[in-house]
Image: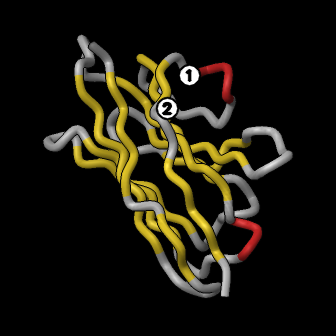
Amino acid sequence: QLQLVESGGGLVQPGGSLRLSCAASGFTRDYYAIGWFRQAPGKEREGVSCISASGGSTDYADSVKGRFTISRDNAKNTVYLQMNSLKPEDTAVYYCAARYGLGCSLGLREYDYWGQGAQVTVSS
């Protein structure tokens, strides 16, 4: 059974940092790309970052470039999203998603498997 589980969300002050983790299990093939998405109240879900199956290719939304870093540890089947210099507008539920294949994409429709989400709140 394919499963993605996010962890590491929480409440942080503006300028602070958080690291989200996405643990994957049940994949029948070992090449899958991971994307991070977020959805703020009243807004559409948007792509934040993605990483290819090998980890050699990444992409970021303009709004998080230079502040967020995505990485993966394939030995642990886990993908991380390090979020620094957080802003109130980063407040959202963050989801990780997976798709079989090598490439990285920020398009929601490219992904077949989704986690349950982790709340990130940036507030003083």
Q: Which residue is mark 2?
A: 97
- Residue at 46 percent across and 42 percent down: it is 51
In this view, 19 is above or below 26: below
In the foreground, 31 or 79: 79
Residue 67 spot, x, y in % from top left:
59, 73
Would residue 77 be found to the left or right of residue 51 on screen?
left
Would residue 46 be found to the left or right of residue 60 on screen?
right
In this view, 23 is above or below 67: above
Q: Are marks 2 and 1 in contact (CB under 8 Å)?
A: yes
Q: Amino acid at mark 1?
A: Tyr
Per the image, label 1 sits on a secondary structure element best described as loop
Residue 110 spot, x, y in % from top left:
61, 20
Q: Quadrant of residue 32?
A: top left
Category of crowding for the residue at label 1, using alpha-carbon neighbours closer than 10 angstroms: few (below 14), some (14–19), many (at least 20): some
- Residue at 35 percent across and 38 percent down: it is 5
Q: Amino acid at mark 2?
A: Ala
**Residue 111: image tag:** 1
